[in-house]
Image (tube, rainbow, N blue to C red):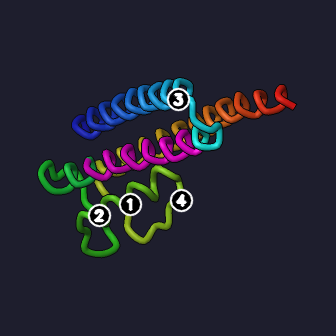
Amino acid sequence: MVLAILLCFVLLVATVIFHYEGLRVLWWYAKSSHGRPRNQQLLIIFGIMALHTVEAGVYGFAYWLGDVPLNIGDFVGHEVGVRDYLYFSAETYTTLGFGDIYPVGDLRLIASGEALNGLLMLGWSASFIYLALERYWERERTKN
């Protein structure tokens, strides 16, 4: 259990820092590029989608790590392969939760942490997108 708690804490800290730095880079790049506002907005949205994909992938790697080499838990539902770790991670990160495969043992703690983390990251991203797009919309309103 201690190993799962430690892994959960490391994943949480790593993804929050990665997300923060990713948003900073996206904001700086969109602000400093002198392209069309539409392209800047799309850059922010697709960039955020890429951040979330990487973060879910990190959790998918953690499930593999916890299942295969560390053996702190297992998955039930069917034989689990690399794709299934990523699938379960994406499903948990977005709090979708189909339930066709699920962790047992200490991996349950990591899944719970990922759901909370994903919910916070998605909310953070939604507010970031709103603030970024509001900036562009305000600029358009003042032009007219």
- Residue 33 is tagged as 3
Mark with earlier residue (1, 2): 2
Q: Amino acid at mark 2?
A: Phe
Task: Compute the Cα span from label 3 to label 1.
Answer: 37 Å
Is 108 drawn above or below residue 87 in the view shown? above
Among the two numbered marks 2 and 3 on one chain, the one whose residue lies closer to the N terminus: 3
Classify mark 1: helix, strand or loop: helix
Q: Nearer the viewer, residue 5 or 142?
A: 142
Q: Position of residue 124 (x, y in %)?
A: 57, 34
CA neighbours of label 1 inside 10 A, class few (<14), some (14 to 19), many (20+) = many
Observer-nearest residue: 75 or 18? Answer: 18
Residue 78 picture location, percent across and down = 30, 75
Q: Earlier in the sequence, mark 3 or mark 1?
A: 3
Marks 1 & 2, CB-CB < 8 Å contact: yes
Q: Secondary structure at mark 4?
A: loop
Q: Which residue is mark 2?
A: 75
Most common secondary structure along the magenta stretch: helix
**Magenta includes 45?**
yes
Tag of residue 96: 4
Closer-to-camera residue (41/13): 41
Residue 54 x, y percent position in the rendering: 36, 46
